[in-house]
Amino acid sequence: MTAPVRDLLSDLSVASGTAITRIIPDGACWRLTDGAGGEHGPFAAVAITFPAPQIAALLAASGFALAGVERATYAPCWSLMVAVERAPADVLIEPNDGPIGLIASDSSKPGRSEGGRLTVHAKPDWSRTHLEARREAIVSVLSKAAEACLGSPLRVGYAQAHRWRFAQVETALEKPCLYEPDLRLGAAGDWCLGPRIEAAHDSGLALANAILSDLGRPA
């Protein structure tokens, strides 16, 4: 899902892998500080688009707030990525029982290299119960559960577990975005409209349009 974003950012200056810890007003502009003590800016406006609990934490550390952001809630997800000798015939499998909610055959997607690759998503309640478990334990449990679902050994060549603390929106704000024109500060994400990639896009577009309008620039 990152390919469309990379294409949109191709002619922009982007600093990835940078943890912003504070946003600081500087006259009519903003400056940002990161976890390494670096500064970024000045910027005419700030748009924040990561999960709502992380937005609330950043705003609190900066002495600001956006009303409503605290109402958004999420379900976590443990995800297992495995390389296997042979992918299953079914592209998507949604088991009824056990810890797994979805098995997806990534190797069925266009442009993928040869070889079987699966993504396994655990169910929200199971992920919440085992949120602090060791990754090695998660790999073991989900691998065995996947074998049971598929009815055959996986013969895994590579396996890695990833924990998404904020994987799927459970409670959305049901509004396009949050924006304070006096501050030129806003936030957007799927948590505004609902647990869909389309909701994330529409929310980000709504915030971008609000900022551009405020700055007197065409949308």
Image (tube, rainbow, N blue to C red):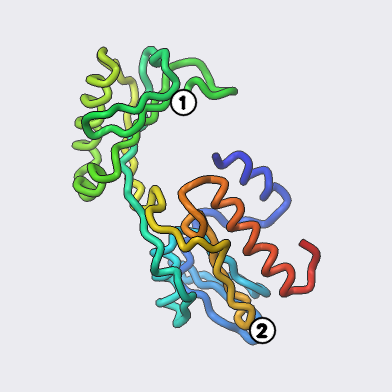
- Mark 2 vs 1, N-terminal side: 2
Who's the residue at 61% across and 53% down the image? 202
- Residue 219 falls in image quadrant: bottom right
Instruction: Tell whether 135 sits left or right of 165.
Output: left
- Answer above or below: position of 183 versus 15: below
Name the residue that disc number 1 marks: 106
Q: Secondary structure at mark 2?
A: loop
Compared across the picture, whether 60 is left or right of 49 comes to left
Q: Nearer the viewer, residue 217 or 114?
A: 217
The residue under the point 28% across, 32% down is: 100
- Residue situated furthest bottom in the rendering: 27
Residue 55 in which image quadrant:
bottom left
Establish if 9 lies above or below 187: above
Label 2, on which residue?
28
Q: In the rendering, at what x and y percent does residue 147 appear? A: 25, 20
At label 2, which amino acid type do we have?
Answer: Ala
Q: CA distance from mark 2 to mark 1?
A: 47 Å
Q: Which mark is residue 69?
A: none
Secondary element under disc 1, as helix, strand or loop, is helix
State which quarter of the image contains the N terminus: top right
Residue 174, image x, y percentages: 50, 61
- Crowd tier of the residue under label 2, counting other residues whose Cα lies within 10 Å: few below 14, some 14–19, many 20 or above: few
**Percent x, y of residue 133:** 19, 45
Q: Position of residue 187 (x, y in %)?
A: 54, 66
Picture residue at 32% right of the left edge, 44% below the top? 77
Is 211 on the left or on the right of 88, as rendered?
A: right
